[in-house]
Amino acid sequence: MCKYKVMCGRTLVMSYFKFLLNVYNEYIASFLDVIVLAIIFYRVILVIKKTRAIQIIFGIFIILVFTIIAKFLRLKAVLWILENFWLAAVIIFSVVFQVEIRNVLAQIGGQVYGFRLKIKDSYVNEIVETVKELSISMTGGLISIENEVGLKNFTETGISLNADISKELLLSIFKNKSAPLHDGAVIIFNDKISAAGCLLPLSHTNIKIFGTRHRAALGLSELTDAVTIVVSEETGQISVAYKGELKVNISLLELKEIISSNGEFLK
């Protein structure tokens, strides 16, 4: 009798697990599938929005529609060309979207391992005071603050400093217009001035009303999640580039909030 009860108990447990497995396969798995895909698409859209990647995706969509039409109309020669294009699409997409793919992976890795660092308030004040002085004297300046995506490739183009952040040091770099470091960017990481005189990639976005510093700030923001501050030499106006967007005529109070929040204040 006892043996019979044990066997019945095992049967009930097995039936219960089978029931749970069926529920997971039928409902929960599909739900999780949708959620994961939604998160992936959302992260990709955040990275590529307002970049040339959107135009490329639109072009791919047109080719897809044209492929369907060619198949429906039985255009053999056109269809052969398009089908061969789709066979090589994986390689083409990996080349075209290499920057966007790298940014997504870097941001995911940064969130998992917590690479994002917060600058101390005292150093934030030093940066803001420096920008204020540059703006008043109408002296050009370019300062990039590293976040999750590393800027080592760009710091290597300048002169390594690894110095504490100070208003005096930053002003000595930018206010001496005859100095070789004046026209380059200062890169800040982990409460240190990593390097000065750094070369940043220029954006291909049409911003003709702005100069080279603004194009460089926007170019870096399209490739990384760095917060880049620009002071215009012509107007003294303060601008900030972050994640592919350029915000102009920023106040000092807004600038402080942007730096303190690693750019999240702009969202």
Image (tube, rainbow, N blue to C red):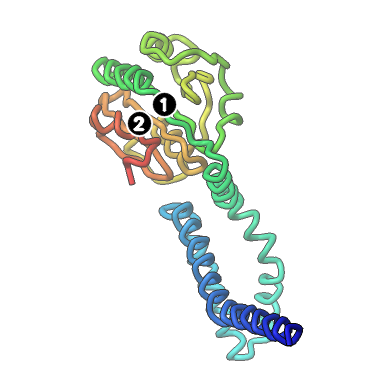
Q: Is the residue under label 2 in contact with that under label 1 (CB below 8 Å)?
A: yes
Residue 90: name its quadrant.
Answer: bottom right
**Kind of element beneath mark 2:** helix
Amino acid tagged 1 = Ile
Q: Quadrant of the N terminus?
A: bottom right
Does residue 267 sit above or below 6 in this rendering?
above
Q: Which residue is mark 1?
A: 119
Residue for point 73% across, 83% down: 2
Using residue 10 as the reference point, say whether residue 61 is left or right of it: left
Residue 49: name its quadrant.
Answer: bottom left
Residue that extends furthest to the front in the rendered view of this protein: 1
**Kind of element beneath mark 1:** loop
Residue for point 65% across, 75% down: 82
Does residue 80 sit above or below 95 in this rendering?
below
Using residue 41 as the reference point, say whether residue 15 is left or right of it: right
Q: Residue 208 at x, y = what percent?
A: 36, 40
Could you say which is closer to the camera, residue 208 or residue 14? Answer: 14
